[in-house]
């Protein structure tokens, strides 16, 4: 049974979310305090953490930052705050999703299931399923160990940043809309969250592009979406 930690200081919301998640077969623990939630997240052996942004003690951003320093489990942040800057900050810290209140418990459960399924699949991939590295000039992507190098130097990417880069690199020269990328990479319908794709794309460019304002690999096709410019019609497998 998958274990989920729910860090939420509103008791009514926490109980409702726990009821729905437990009805779907998950074991759920609740913490209403940020400092306690951070400690539990790091030591409790959880498969996924749901974080509210505003908490007594450490806030959700601080907890997410602490988790990402030690663990790669899915982290979903929940907030009533609609500001784009909060979403950008959460995703930049390594959160896998940002869900705005109010939302239906069934939507939350669907997102939890999707993120857990993807994480389990990635962790359980057999070595023979992890194909050879891809090279595009000075950019090298290693799908098996999930590593990226530019000019021989390793670039540290968050889990979803890597997933997005790999998906585009495996489909070079094809234009994908934000909705399609969210559906294929996050494996959920966009649900009005296509800004998530833009945030990850901007961070990817900042990390791997020599000149992010004039990207070499991650191109914007205005009015259509994004494409990976491989410099040729096919990837070079090495």
Image (spheres, rainbow, N blue to C red):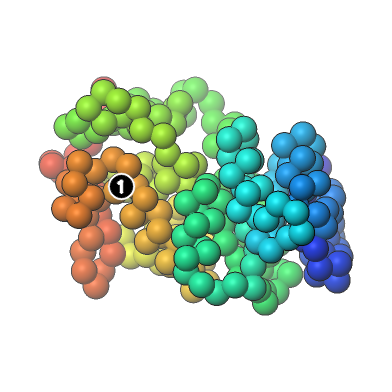
Which quadrant does the C terminus fall into?
A: top left
Which quadrant does the N terminus fall into?
A: top right
Q: Position of residue 70 (x, y in %)?
A: 62, 32
In this view, the residue in front, 39 or 231, is 39
Furthest residue in direction front, as rendered: 57
Horizontal arrangement in the rendering, residue 46 relative to residue 145 (left or right): right
Q: In terms of image quadrants, where is residue 143?
A: top left
141 shown above or below 2: above
Q: Residue at x 32, y 42 (%)?
A: 207
Q: Position of residue 184 (x, y in %)?
A: 44, 55
Furthest residue in direction bottom, as rendered: 102
Q: Residue at x 57, y 62 (%)?
A: 98
Q: What residue sits right under mark 1 in the picture?
A: 206
Horizontal arrangement in the rendering, residue 76 relative to residue 148 (left or right): right
Q: Position of residue 114 (x, y in %)?
A: 61, 54
220 shown above or below 84: above
Q: Secondary structure at mark 1?
A: helix
Q: Position of residue 63 (x, y in %)?
A: 66, 47
In this view, the residue in front, 135 or 6, is 6
In this view, the residue in front, 59 or 24, is 59
Answer yes or no: is residue 117 visible: no
């Amino acid at each position: 049974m998958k274990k989920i930690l729910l860090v939420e200081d509103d008791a009514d919301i926490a109980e409702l979310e726990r009821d729905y998640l437990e009805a779907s077969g998950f074991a759920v623990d609740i913490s209403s305090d940020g400092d306690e939630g951070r400690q539990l997240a790091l030591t409790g052996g959880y498969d996924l953490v749901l974080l509210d942004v505003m908490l007594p003690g450490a806030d959700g951003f601080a907890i997410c930052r602490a988790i990402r320093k030690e663990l790669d489990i899915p982290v979903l942040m929940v907030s009533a705050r609609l500001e784009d800057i909060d979403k950008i900050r959460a995703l930049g810290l390594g959160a896998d999703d940002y869900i705005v209140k109010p939302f239906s418990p069934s939507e939350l459960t669907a997102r939890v299931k999707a993120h857990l399924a993807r994480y389990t699949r990635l962790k359980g991939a057999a070595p023979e399923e992890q194909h050879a590295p891809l090279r595009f000039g000075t950019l090298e992507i290693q799908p098996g160990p999930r590593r990226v190098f530019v000019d021989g130097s390793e670039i540290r990417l968050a889990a979803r940043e890597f997933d997005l880069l790999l998906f585009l690199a495996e489909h070079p020269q094809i234009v994908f809309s934000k909705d399609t990328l969210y559906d294929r990479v996050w494996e959920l319908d966009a649900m009005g969250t296509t800004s998530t794709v833009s945030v990850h794309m901007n961070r990817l460019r900042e990390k791997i592009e020599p000149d992010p304002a004039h990207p070499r690999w991650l191109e914007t096709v205005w009015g259509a979406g994004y494409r990976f410019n491989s410099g040729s019609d096919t990837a070079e497998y090495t």
